[in-house]
C-alpha cells in the first residue's frame, strides 16, 4: 500500500464494496476493512480513510483517537438520524449518497489535508 490508497472501513460488506467500486472506477486504489482495529495501521499512511458511523459507534474509543489523528484525511459516513459529529477537521457525508457526492467529498478532503 502507498499514500495514494483510500481506506474504507464499514461493517456492512455491501457498503464497503459499493464505496470501493465507486472510488476504483475513478482511478483510486482502495483497501477495505470490516473493523477499525484491522484498518488502523493502514489508515495512518493512507491518502484518506472513510469510516462508517456503525464502526465509529461500535469502536468508539479507537475511532475517536483515529478521527482526531486523521483530521482532514477522514470522511465519516452517517445516516440522517446519526448523532455523530465530525471531529476536528473531519468531513461528514450523509447516507444515502451518490457517486459524485462521494467523489466531491474525497477530493475536498484530499485538498484540505495538503
Image (tube, grey):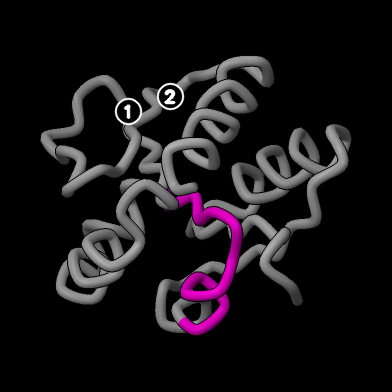
Residue at 54%, 52% in the rendered image: 12
Do the residues bearing badges 1 and 2 touch, measured as CB atoms within 8 Å?
A: yes
Which residue is tagged 2? 95
Q: Nearer the viewer, residue 23 or 71?
A: 71
Note whether 87 is above or below 40 in the view shown: above
Q: Is residue 88 left or right of residue 1?
A: left
**Does the magenta segment cover residue 7?**
no
Q: Which residues are magenta?
A: 41-52
The CA distance from mark 1 to mark 2 is: 5 Å
Q: Quadrant of residue 104?
A: top right
Residue at 15%, 38% in the rendered image: 85
Q: Is residue 21 left or right of residue 110?
A: right
Q: Is residue 80 left or right of residue 101?
A: left
Residue at 48%, 59% in the rendered image: 11
In x, y percent, where is residue 48?
54, 54
In x, y percent, where is residue 94?
37, 23
In x, y percent, where is residue 6?
64, 56
Other residues around mark 2 within 10 Å, as few (<14) / some (14–19) / many (≥20): few
Q: Is residue 28 left or right of residue 89?
A: right
Note whether 17 is above or below 58 in the view shown: above
Q: Residue furthest left?
A: 83
Amino acid at each position: 500500500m502507498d499514500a495514494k490508497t483510500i481506506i474504507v472501513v464499514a461493517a456492512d460488506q455491501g457498503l464497503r464494496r459499493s464505496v470501493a467500486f465507486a472510488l476504483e472506477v475513478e482511478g483510486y486504489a482502495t483497501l477495505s476493512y470490516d473493523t477499525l482495529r484491522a484498518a488502523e495501521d493502514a489508515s495512518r499512511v493512507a491518502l484518506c480513510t472513510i469510516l462508517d458511523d456503525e464502526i465509529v459507534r461500535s469502536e468508539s474509543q479507537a475511532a475517536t483517537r483515529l478521527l482526531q489523528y486523521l483530521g482532514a484525511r477522514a470522511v465519516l459516513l452517517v445516516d440522517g438520524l446519526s448523532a455523530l459529529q465530525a471531529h476536528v477537521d473531519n468531513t461528514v457525508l450523509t447516507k444515502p449518497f451518490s457517486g459524485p457526492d462521494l467523489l466531491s467529498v474525497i477530493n475536498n478532503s484530499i485538498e484540505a489535508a495538503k
